[in-house]
Image (spheres, grey):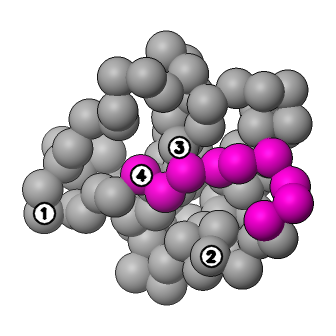
């Protein structure tokens, strides 16, 4: 399984946009993709909910900052969109 974390301590730098583009690319090539969103704004999750059903499937990785859950075992690619300001142990 591939695990990709998109992180940057700065907000507004494009982490969510990059996360959904990476997820779309892998899904287009028939990978089983899960996208998790730890950001308070939940931009990636909202985008995922609005994504047209006729496009390649990207599944929501139900995850929260309080309770970390591993991606499902049948997942090929797990992408994690992180919040701004992660440093040290939190990262």
Asked if labels 3 and 4 touch by Cβ distance under 8 angstroms, the answer is: yes
Asked if labels 1 and 3 touch by Cβ distance under 8 angstroms, the answer is: no
Lower position in the chain sequence, tag 4 or tag 3: 3
82 or 8, which lies in front?
Answer: 82
Q: Which mark is residue 49?
A: 2
Alpha carbon of mark 4 to alpha carbon of mark 2: how far? Answer: 12 Å
Alpha carbon of mark 4 to alpha carbon of mark 3: how far? Answer: 5 Å
Q: Is residue 59 magenta?
A: yes
Task: Kindly give the residue lying farthest to the front in the view shown.
Answer: 54
Q: Nearer the viewer, mark 4 or mark 1?
A: 4
Residue hosting label 4? 61
Residue hosting label 1? 66
- Secondary structure beneath dot 4 equals loop
Lower position in the chain sequence, tag 3 or tag 2: 3
Above or below, 26 relative to 46: above
Q: Residues within 10 Å of mark 4 (few under 14, many from 20)?
A: many
Lower position in the chain sequence, tag 4 or tag 2: 2
Residue, x 65% and y 49% (percent of image)?
58
The residue range painted magenta reads 53-61
């Amino acid at each position: 399984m591939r695990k990709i974390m998109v992180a940057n301590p700065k907000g507004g730098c494009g982490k969510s946009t990059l996360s959904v583009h990476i997820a779309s690319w892998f899904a287009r090539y028939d990978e089983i993709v899960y996208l998790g969103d730890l950001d308070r704004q939940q931009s990636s999750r909202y985008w995922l909910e609005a994504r047209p059903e006729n496009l390649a499937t990207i599944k929501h990785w139900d995850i929260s900052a309080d309770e970390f859950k591993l991606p499902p075992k049948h997942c090929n690619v797990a992408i994690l969109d992180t919040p701004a300001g992660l440093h040290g142990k939190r990262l």
